[in-house]
Structures are given as structure tokens and as C-alpha cells.
Amino acid sequence: MGAVNVANKDINVSLAEKKPRVVFVLGGPGSGKGTQCANIVEHFHYTHLSAGDLLRAEIKSGSENGTMIQNMIKEGKIVPSEVTIKLLEKAMLESGNDKFLIDGFPRNEENRAAFEAVTKIEPEFVLFFNCPEEEMEKRLLSRNQGREDDNIETIRKRFKVFLDSSLPVIEYYKAKGKVREIEAAKPIGEVFEAVKVVFTPKAEKVVA
Ligand SMILES: Nc1ncnc2c1ncn2[C@@H]1O[C@H](COP(=O)(O)OP(=O)(O)OP(=O)(O)O)[C@@H](O)[C@H]1O
Ligand SMILES: Nc1ccn([C@@H]2O[C@H](COP(=O)(O)O)[C@@H](O)[C@H]2O)c(=O)n1
Ligand SMILES: [Mg+2]
């Protein structure tokens, strides 16, 4: 435990020193976060870190937390921040990049406050994909990526967690003027056109 704490301290010091640029990418399950992050990476050279993907990789790695994480994901519950933040910090430091899309995080108030306290990083802005449940449900049920949480029972639990725990985080950042909201119930290309506007520096935007 002591060794882990020492290593953590080193990680935190160097992340705080690096002062990376962070965009939080939020939205309901199936709103298209991962799909649009792939486009943003290609055009704007961010590194994409999906908290859900990191947690799924942790299960596969045979980590001591694997069973706990797997059980929480099956129930659509939010894994304790300590676990997720360690994975995010490690991935940020290993990437060598200085700008990140953090997808699916912070998912609740505990995630948000712990990330800020541990890393001292404030997001540049929050990209929020707003999509009706009916559309998200349809997408998740036809995603076919073998995810254990893409079944109707877990999907309904994930929707409830989104409404109860994740929307308040979006509201928190809205009050700070940091939310860039995207209408996500459109074809992928149209959604990306709206995303591009958010990421294009003001000076480069063409005035019509
Ligand atoms: N604009 C869109 N129109 C139609 N289908 C879409 C659109 N965006 C994404 N999809 C499809 O919907 C499914 C969910 O998309 P994606 O995995 O990007 O969502 P997500 O927000 O990352 O979901 P999760 O929170 O579950 O990880 C995928 O099969 C994807 O191909
Ligand atoms: N901050 C987070 C993000 C995700 N989880 C868990 O992973 C599941 C899948 O996440 P996706 O973003 O890939 O949909 C999610 O339902 C949670 O169980 C988490 O705990 N904390
Ligand atoms: Mg995703």
C-alpha cells in the first residue's frame, strides 16, 4: 500500500506540472461519445481516454479490482473514483500528449470532486451530447460489441444513473459557462459538423 501511495504521489506531481488540456466528453449511454471522439482525434489530434474502456481493460488484465469492476458495470453502477482516476492518470502520463478527451468521466459528483482534488486540473470545457433515451436505447441494442451492459435490463439502470448522478455534473459545469451542447440525435456526419465548430479556434471560423 505504501509503495502504491508513493507512486501515486509521483504521478500527481508530474500531472500537475504538465498542466495538460482536458475536455470532458459527457452524454447518456449510447449518445455517441466514443464515435465522435474518434473523429475529434483524427482532426484535432487529442488523445481519447474512455473511462469505460479503461475499466474494461482493467477487468481483462486480471487486476485485483477486476471482479468488483465487472460487477459494477453489469449493474450500471459507478466504480469508486479512486480506481478510475488512477487509470486515467496512468494513461495520461503514458500517452506523451498534452491534450485529452476524457470520455464518460466525471460520471457523478464524487468523480468530479475527486479528479479536481487529486489532479488540480479544470476542464477547458465539457462537450455534452444531448440525445433522447429512445434513440440511445435503439443504438445500444444494435451496437453488437459484446458488451455485458448492452442488454435492456442494464441499459435501463444506466439511464437512471445518468439522470440521477451524471446530469447534475453537467448542470454544475453549465453554471460555470463550460458546457458546449451538441444535438446528438442526427446522423454521425451532421453531429461531427457541430462538434468541429466547438473545436475550431475562433480566429479560423469563417464569418458568413
Ligand atoms: N449519430 C449517430 N447516429 C446513429 N448511430 C450512431 C450515432 N453515433 C453513434 N452511433 C452508434 O450508436 C452506438 C453507440 O455509439 P457510441 O459507442 O459512440 O456511444 P457512447 O456514447 O460511447 O456509448 P457508451 O456510453 O455506452 O459507451 C454505436 O453502435 C455507434 O455506431
Ligand atoms: N467514470 C466512469 C465511467 C464508466 N464507469 C462504468 O463503466 C460503464 C460503462 O461506461 P461507458 O462510458 O463505456 O458506457 C458504466 O456504466 C459504469 O458502470 C464508471 O464506473 N465510472
Ligand atoms: Mg463509449
Image (tube, rainbow, N blue to C red):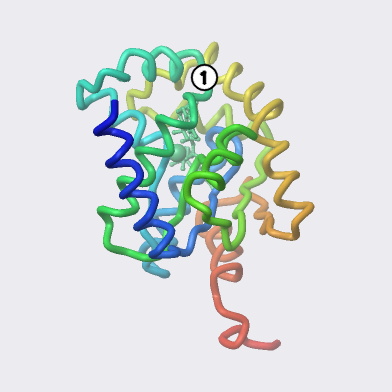
Return the residue found at the far left. Answer: 61
Residue 178, x across and y down, in percent: 69, 59
The residue carrying pointer 1 sits among few (fewer than 14), some (14 to 19) or many (20 or more) residues within 10 Å by Cα, namely many
Q: Amino acid at mark 1?
A: Gly
Residue at screen point 60% across, 17% down: 156
What is the quadrant of residue 125 in the picture?
bottom right
Residue 83, x across and y down, in percent: 40, 30
Q: Identify whether 76 is placed above or below 133.
A: above
Could you say which is closer to the camera, residue 92 or residue 148?
92
Residue 35, x across and y down, in percent: 44, 48
The number of numbered discs placed on residues in the rendered structure image is 1
Q: Identify whether 5 is placed above or below 47.
A: above
Residue at screen point 31% across, 47% down: 91
Relative placement, left or right, of 26 versus 74 is right
Residue 110, x across and y down, in percent: 60, 32
Relative placement, left or right, of 50 versus 28 is left
Residue at screen point 57% across, 23% down: 158
The yes-or-no answer for disc 1 within 8 Å of ligand 2 is yes
What is the quadrant of residue 29 in the picture?
top right
Q: Identify whether 75 is placed above or below 34.
A: above
Could you say which is closer to the camera, residue 63 or residue 128?
63
Q: Quadrant of the N terminus?
A: top left
Relative placement, left or right, of 14 versus 182 is left
Where does label 1 land, which residue? Answer: 76
Mark 1 secondary-structure assignment: loop
What is the quadrant of residue 143 in the picture?
top left
Residue at screen point 56% across, 86% down: 204
Could you say which is closer to the camera, residue 192 or residue 61?
61
Return the residue found at the far right. Answer: 175
